[in-house]
Image: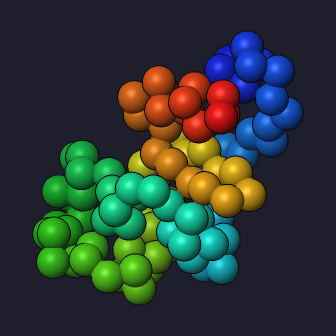
């Protein structure tokens, strides 16, 4: 992650496509998330292909299950610190979090 390098911040990069989070990790991320939890679910062609609706991703339990069932539907990038998690879009949000 270039922003972490620019700021001199140590960062562990986790490629969720190759190493998807388990249920406990997802729940930890959601507990720290500054964004609404439902924002973790991408609203893209996969969302449509799976015939998901907003009603399918309203609760934390639903969100966790949808992501566990379909790892590619999780919004990326995520930036997780010991206290906070954000969706890293736009990239200025990552800079603001890591610079503080």
Q: Is residue 46 left or right of residue 26?
A: left
Asked if one can make out residue 32 in the rendered structure from this viewpoint, the answer is yes
Instruction: Please say if 17 is above or below 98.
Output: below
Q: Residue at x 32, y 82 (%)?
A: 59
Residue 2 in the image, given as x and y percentages of width and height = 68, 18
Instruction: Please say if 3 is above or below 56.
Output: above
Report the quarter where the N terminus lies: top right
Residue projecting furthest to the front: 100
Q: Residue at x 73, y 14 (%)?
A: 6
Residue 97 in the image, given as x and y percentages of width and height = 59, 37
Q: Residue at x 70, y 51 (%)?
A: 81
Report the quarter where the C terminus lies: top right
Q: Residue at x 41, y 85 (%)?
A: 61
Residue 93 in the image, given as x and y percentages of width and height = 47, 32
Instruction: Please say if 6 is above or below 62.
Output: above
Indicate the quadrant where residue 63 lies.
bottom left
């Amino acid at each position: 992650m270039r922003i972490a390098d620019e700021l001199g911040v140590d960062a562990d990069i986790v490629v969720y496509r190759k190493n998807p989070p388990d249920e406990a990790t997802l729940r930890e991320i959601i507990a720290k998330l500054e964004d609404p939890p439902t924002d973790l679910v991408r609203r893209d062609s996969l969302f449509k292909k799976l015939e998901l609706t907003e009603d399918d991703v309203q609760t934390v339990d639903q969100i966790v299950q949808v992501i566990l069932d379909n790892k590619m539907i999780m919004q990326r990038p995520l930036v997780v610190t010991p206290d906070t998690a954000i969706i890293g879009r736009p990239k200025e949000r990552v800079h603001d979090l890591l610079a503080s």
